[in-house]
Amino acid sequence: MNARDTRAEAVDTIQRELTAFARRARGRAAELHPELSLVAYSILDLVLERDGCQATDLAEQFLLDKSTVSRQVGALEKLGYLDREVDPGNRRNHLLRATAAGRAVARAAEHRRREAFTARFADWTDADVEAMAGYLVRYNHGG
């Protein structure tokens, strides 16, 4: 096997494993709350991080169309996890804020995610965990 074949095989493995990771994450999201998708949890997390953001900010961040974000925001509102306020600077826009219930469900989800990751990495060396973190940052930033 030459270097090109080895690299192609490695890329195939990465693709397969990232797909498995995404499936597992979607499944875990459903375990936390059957009505919330992984996208909804991600939106809630970003609203917590960027209090007062707009739906267009979310669409940009996640590379989603506005209708998808609107549906997810609507679901989060219906469950009482998000509030939509009129933007005092531009009354045509709305600002999104997490409610107390939204903050609580996000904290619980973060706690469960951290437990799951901690368990997964329990038998990894610190150096391996740090390397994985570095590779993921590099991958997600396109470099």
Image (cartoon, rainbow, N blue to C red):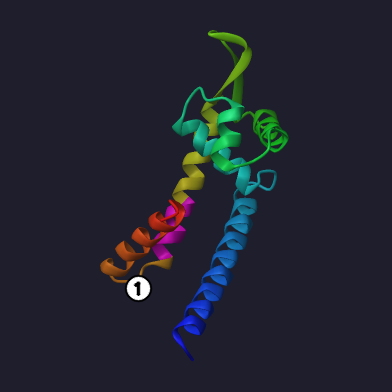
User: Foreground residue, 71 or 60?
Assistant: 60
When asked about the image quadrant of residue 36, the answer is top right
Residue 42 magenta-drawn? no
Instruction: Give the magenta-colored segment's residue range.
Output: 112-119
The residue depicted at 53 percent of the width and 80 percent of the height is 9
Q: Residue at x 52, y 27 (%)?
A: 100
- Helix, strand or loop under label 1: loop
In the picture, residue 49 is in which quadrant? top left
Residue at image position (62%, 41%) is 40
- In the picture, measured across the screen, residue 123 lies left or right of residue 31, that is left
Where does the C terminus fall, quadrant-wise? Answer: bottom left
Q: Position of residue 79 (x, y in %)?
A: 67, 32
Outermost left residue: 127
In this rendering, would 118 be left or right of 7? left
Q: Nearer the viewer, residue 59 or 82?
A: 59
**Percent from the top left, x then y, of residue 30?**
65, 52
Residue at the disc numbered 1: 123
Q: Which amino acid does label 1 sit on?
A: Asp
Nearer the observer, 135 or 130: 135
